[in-house]
Amino acid sequence: MKPTDAFGVIVRTLGFLIILEVLWRVLVSLETVLIPPYATGPEGIAWTLAFLVTQFLVLLVGCGCFFRADVVVRWSYRDTGPGRESN
């Protein structure tokens, strides 16, 4: 296995673990997010929206790592591509 292939596997694994972590956090927090034990007010809604937005952004990073690992590998190994001589 070439180093680029191994790095691609590592990036995809990291992306998959990030996706699982986000899904786990959202599923575990659904009770808190949807049915809070306190009276909902502006601060409760703001916390819920902030939580969901940050988890969505982290999910985008995880999906980017998982589904676009080839782009990350090409970007990381751009100096060792075909036709380029390394000294």
Image: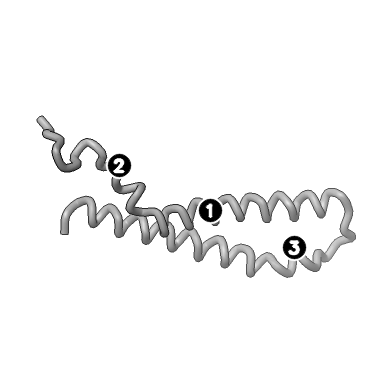
| Residue 39 locus on image (x, y percent) | 89, 60
Give the quarter of the image for residue 84. Answer: top left
Furthest residue to the top?
A: 87
The answer to the question of whether label 3 and label 2 lie on touching residues, with beta carbons closer than 8 A, is: no
Residue at figure coordinates x 42%, y 54% from the top left: 65
Quarter of the rendering occupied by the N terminus: bottom left
Q: In the drawing, does residue 83 fall left or right of residue 29?
A: left
Label 3 and label 1: CA atoms lie apart by 20 Å
The label nearer to you, 3 versus 1, is: 1
Q: Secondary structure at mark 1?
A: helix
Q: Sequence-wise, which precedes: disc 3 or disc 1?
A: 3
Find disc 1 in the rendering and name its residue.
Answer: 60
Mark 3: which amino acid? Val
Mark 1: which amino acid? Leu
Find disc 3 in the rendering and name its residue.
Answer: 33
Q: Secondary structure at mark 3?
A: helix
Label 1 and label 2: CA atoms lie apart by 20 Å
For disc 3, the neighbor class at 10 Å (few under 14, some 14 to 19, many from 20) is: some
Mark 2: which amino acid? Ser
Q: In the drawing, does residue 3 fall left or right of residue 54?
A: left
The label nearer to you, 3 versus 2, is: 2
Residue at figure coordinates x 50%, y 51% from the top left: 61
Q: Secondary structure at mark 2?
A: helix
| Residue 12 locus on image (x, y percent) | 37, 59
Query: Along the line of sight, which residue is nearer the eye, 17 or 78?
Result: 78
| Residue 41 locus on image (x, y percent) | 89, 53
Q: Sequence-wise, which precedes: disc 1 or disc 2?
A: 1
